[in-house]
Amino acid sequence: QVQLVESGGGLVQAGGSRRLSCAASGRTLSNSAMGWFRQAPENEREFVAAISGRGDNTNYADSVQGRFTVSRDNAKNTLYLQMNSLKPEDTAVYYCAARSHDPVYRISIAYDYWGQGTQVTVSS
């Protein structure tokens, strides 16, 4: 079984930056795509970014392209999301997710494991 624990959320001003981390345990995920999703109040969970097991393929939602960067350190079994130029509309609970294998997918049902989420609030 895989456990995912997010950290790094908090309150940040618009235009600021924040880095989220997701520590995985239970098994090595170096051959598994991982991703970030987010859910704002009264909204459905939406795709943010994803990365392949080796980190050589990334995919981003249009709304974050050019502002967010997804990366991973397989030696540490950790996924990251660097968020720059944050906007109030980025406010949401951010979830880390992992598949059992590659490739990258943008849909939540393709992911087998989920973290509990970390709140990011961007003030205007």
Image (tube, rainbow, N blue to C red):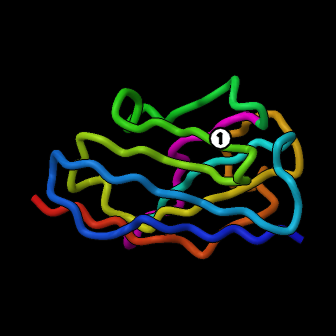
Q: Nearer the viewer, residue 52 or 93?
A: 52
The stretch drawn in magenta includes residue 43: yes
The residues colored magenta run: 40-52
Q: Quadrant of residue 95?
A: bottom right
User: 10 Å neighbourhood of mark 1: few (<14), some, or many (≥20)?
Assistant: some
Tell me if residue 37 comes above or below residue 63 in the rendering: below
Quadrant where the C terminus is found in the figure: bottom left
Looking at this view, name the residue that lies furthest to the left. 124
Q: Position of residue 62 (x, y in %)?
A: 43, 31
Tell me if residue 4 comes above or below residue 29 in the rendering: below
Residue at 64% across / 48% down in the picture? 35
Q: Amino acid at mark 1?
A: Arg
Residue at 31% across / 61% down in the picture? 91
Tell me if residue 100 comes above or below residue 53 in the rendering: below
Q: Position of residue 30 (x, y in %)?
A: 82, 43
Residue at 88% across / 61% down in the picture? 27
Residue corresponding to mark 1? 106
Quadrant where the N terminus is found in the figure: bottom right
